[in-house]
Image (cartoon, rainbow, N blue to C red):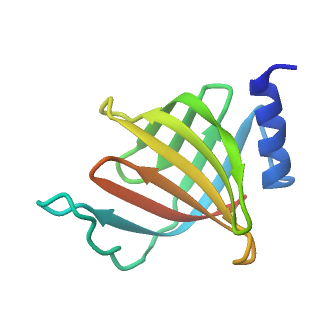
Amino acid sequence: MSLGRIFIILLFIGFGYQNVQGQSYRFKTSGFSVLEKNERGKWGEWSALDLVNLSVVLDTDKHRIVVYSQELQLFNILNYIEREENDTDIVYSFVCKDNDGRECKLSIITRKKQDYRKQLYINYDDHIIVYNIITV
């Protein structure tokens, strides 16, 4: 069995049973926040959490993650990073390229000590976007 197939199986087990078409994992967002670097390259403060109800789809057949915001955010997966787990988190990460060809890292993090709530982090060199997500 290939590493990719093992990853998909573990991803499915990690997210639990859900409505799946092919290898598609669907989420809804409940809020988002942004963290940016200032002119000196130092990280600032997280913005206030904005409530937002968007669809997010992880499609491993097409190797992409799509955030259906007003401006579609399409992330083509270049590399699947090995699953990480510690006492507090389970992390699935992906090296991606966005609509503009910029490289970024997306991570779906399950917070074990916070009732297993999930978050999607979109990490760029100069800013980070976090969405609170639920599996649908």
Q: Residue at x 59, y 28 (%)?
A: 63
Horizontally, residue 8 falls left or right of residue 110, namely right
Q: Measuring from the top left, give residue 65's x and y in whole percent.
A: 55, 40
Quick one: quadrant of the C terminus? bottom right
Q: In front here: 86 or 55?
A: 86
Horizontally, residue 58 falls left or right of residue 131, namely right
In the displayed structure, 34 sits above or below 19; it is below
Quick one: quadrant of the N terminus? top right
Residue at the top extreme, as displayed: 2
Q: Quadrant of residue 93?
A: top right
Q: Residue at x 68, y 26 (%)?
A: 61
In the displayed structure, 48 sits above or below 33; it is below
Q: In front here: 112 or 74?
A: 112
Q: Measuring from the top left, give residue 56's x and y in whole percent.
A: 57, 50
Q: Quadrant of residue 24?
A: top right
Count of all numbered marks drawn on residues in the image: 0
Q: Residue at x 72, y 76 (%)?
A: 113
Residue at the front extreme, as displayed: 86
Q: Measuring from the top left, give residue 131's x and y in whole percent.
A: 50, 63
Q: Measuring from the top left, give residue 9's x and y in whole percent.
A: 84, 37
Horizontally, residue 115 falls left or right of residue 43, namely right
